[in-house]
Image (tube, grey):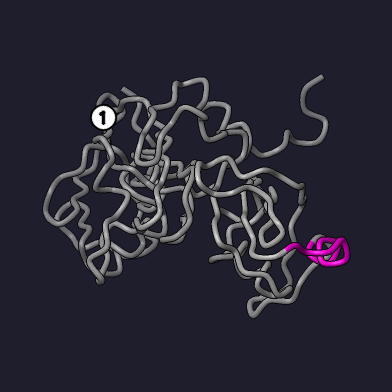
Amino acid sequence: MRHSAPVRLQKLLAEAGLGSRRAVEGWIRAGRVTVGGRRAQLGDRATPGDDVRLDGKRLKLAPGEATPHELLLYYKPAGEVTTRSDPEGRPTVFERLPLPRRGRWIGVGRLDVNTTGLLLLTTDGRLAHRLMHPSSEVEREYQVRLRGRPSGEVLAQLLLGVRLEDGTAAFARITADTWEEAGSGGGSRSHSTFRVVLTEGRNREVRRLWQAVGFEVSRLKRIRYGPIELPRDLKPGGTRLAGPAVLEKLARAVAPPPAPGAGG
């Protein structure tokens, strides 16, 4: 039987769906990972057949034990945080999720506590890393309800770029919209609604962009991440397991382009 070549621990554990590479690096730094009974160090390599343990528990990494990765769509309601635990005791999205068949759920990006909408979770750590990496430029689309009605000049400024404390940012697209949730009131003299698209995932970026041009966001909902849209029939707090075709569609969205001269 042919043995796999050793790879970095971060890659090995992430591809097994046990956590993102960044999370695995944190485990290694904290001394929680061992290889062959020895405390692991950053830069160590291992194979799926090695005795790799997390907090003393051997991890299942052998190819024969692998099951297909999964993708979960979750409609996050307001009031939940997207971390696994919260020092303030607020509910987390992970309390509602069904258990995956293998590994654990890794959130693809985050939504702040007051933002609702589509949150993707996968057991594929490598895919999650690629989706969140700035170089992938994966589109995130949001419905936003504002207090007030911005002028055309303000919208043009948001498309050209606005200076934030962590650098210049801009929306890729802005279109007028009607808020769909019951009781929101839709457009009015005191409020307006838009769909906005970003290609990066900075902390609270949508809210900060509007705030920078003098407008307060009263409601915010993510309705699309890459090619995956929030299902219209999914209710807040609801989950939906995506089929293999949807997972493959998402993976293709961040696949590297073919090498020059490859293909027909």
Q: Residue furthest front?
A: 189
Q: Residue furthest left?
A: 56
Relative to 91, does residue 182 appear above or below in the rendering? Answer: above
Q: Locate residue 203, reporting x and y percent.
A: 54, 66
Residue at the location (63% across, 46% down)? 141
Instruction: Give the left or right position of residue 133, taking residue 258 as reference.
Output: left
- Graded by Cα atoms within 10 Å as few (under 14), some (14 to 19) or many (20 or more), the crowding at tag 1 reads few
Given residues 32 and 86, the one toward you in this image is: 86
Instruction: Give the left or right position of residue 211, taking residue 131 as reference.
Output: right
Residue range highlighted in magenta: 149-158
Given residues 61 and 24, the one toward you in this image is: 24
Residue at the location (29% across, 38% down)? 48
Q: Main secondary structure of the magenta part?
A: helix
Relative to 53, does residue 209 appear above or below in the rendering? Answer: below
Identified by mark 1, the residue type is Arg
Give the labeled residue for mark 1: 101
Question: Does residue 149 appear in the picture of this structure?
Answer: yes
Q: Locate residue 213, reporting x and y percent.
A: 73, 73
Q: Is residue 150 magenta?
A: yes
Q: Quadrant of residue 145?
A: bottom right
